[in-house]
Amino acid sequence: MEAALGGHRLWLQEVAAGRLIVSRSSRVFVLLALWSSTAWAQSPATDDAGTTTVRPVVNDVRAEARWRFDRGLKLYNQNDYRGALAEFLRAYELTHHVQVQFNLALVYAKLEQSAEVVRLLTGLLDAKEPKITPEQQQLAREVVAVHRQRLGLLEVTANVDDAVIQINNVEVAKTPADPIPVGAGSHVVSVLAPDYEPRRFEVVVPSQTTRQLAVELRPLQENLAHLDVSTSAPSVQVFAGDELIGTTPFDASVAFRPGVHQLRFVRPGYVSEERTVVLHPGSSGQLSVKLTLDAAATQQGKLAVTVSQPQALVWVDGEPRLDFSDGLRLPVGKHLLRVERSGYHELQREVVVEPGGSAVFVELFPTADTLAAYVDSAYSQRLWSYVTLGAGVAVSAGAVGFLIWNGARETDAQATFDAELADARDTVSGRCTTPECQEAVRASGDELKRVQGREVWGWVGLGVGVAGMAAGIWMRLGADDPDKFQASSGALVSNLGLEVRPGGAALRGNF
């Protein structure tokens, strides 16, 4: 078994060294297969003059799903697996697409959450008609086989039928239940039933082992009380007396027997907090605890946050932070990051602060109205850049043509002046003494000066035209990209597999 696990670790390292490589060869086919219409549809619009134009219409849900998936791929390739997980989870929430589910499993594999890997991939493989490719099915079987070796089984029995079994405060089954696969390690197991006192146990389950837990529920004389427990920071252990209730955040309310309970909240890097709660039979309530940073804590790191949009509001563990770009001193471990900006979707994700420091780049996705306004503005900027460039080209061309034409007129005027001057010098005295001669020389000289004088307007026009072209080019280069928030891949991954090469391995996908 150790040899197999060691080989898989090496395989995962090779995959981690690879990248999700995009091929666009089947892009059009996948677009038609995945979406009934594109995320950026074209809709005709008619103005007052009766002219019909085609403008982009943004489908917020599909556009966001594709953008989230694209962001997930980028974060995966940057080894930011928690960031990739947040983006894939959002994309799956929007689409429930099997390819997103498949990639979620791969991310969970990177995060070593074997139970989620097996659950997601088994669901794809057990379908009557699997919607993933044969290559993906083979990869899924290999990954499931390895991660099952990292799982143990927890067999919970109770003296009451239909008792709820929770693992780490998440309901997973009801009694009687088949053995439950869980990741190797420590888990908080709760067994709950109406009219019975709740029981909780901290159970260590080794890999490839079935751990049995027999629970005897004792009848209650009074109904259970329920308490929604939350903390400002995640990964806080909650104790009721000496009993470990679980680790925040909780997915559901916590059941208690009625009475007085002394709750204790513990996490390294924070000052421990205690709360006394009095719970009446059948009651429900909420308890929110704000933890204070321990100034004497040594296990701290720095979290630097960069946001794609200016004037964004950043919260860390529920606290607004204005100094986020300079780096925040935080206890090592998990923290909850929330970023908001008007006109953009709120982003929440879990970040991990390492002892040496961590950096997070947050890219916000606009709402439908903001996205439509942005696309419209971007197209307008492009249009005016082309108009300015075209005007500059036209003015420059006209100026050059004028200079060429005027140059020819100047040559003719110079020849006329030279001829009149030569005729004057052919007289007996060598001077132009007759009124006719003087008038001819003066007229030809004035014409030459006039032609030479208007040449400056050609150079001015050329300068204006060149400036217009430069302005048009500058406007085009500085214009917003209307496809900025469109997924660069163009569609969700339709084919993803492992390619083994002499130099390593890479995940390859067709789009």
Image: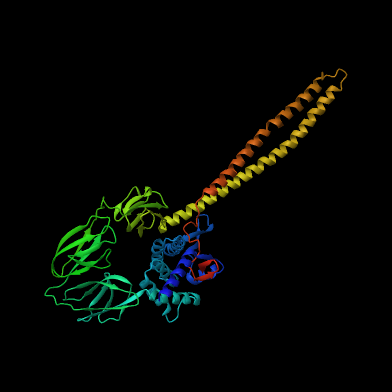
Residue 377: x, y in percent?
48, 52
Residue 348 in view in this figure: no
Which quadrant is the N terminus positioned in? bottom left
Residue 206 in view in this figure: yes
Residue 155: x, y in percent?
28, 79
Q: Considering depth in this image, is 385 or 82 the residue closer to the camera?
A: 82
Residue 338: x, y in percent?
34, 56
State the image quarter where residue 88 is shown. bottom left
Check the image and report above or below for 306 versus 242: above
State the image quarter where residue 371 is shown. bottom left
Colour scheme of the picture: rainbow
Q: Considering depth in this image, is 131 or 447 the residue closer to the camera?
A: 131
Check the image and report above or below for 388 versus 437: below
Q: Considering depth in this image, is 88 or 115 the residue closer to the camera?
A: 115
Which residue is drawn at the image coordinates 45% and 54% (left, top)?
A: 374
Which residue is drawn at the image coordinates 82% and 28% (left, top)?
A: 419
Residue 87: x, y in percent?
40, 63
Q: Residue furthest front?
A: 3
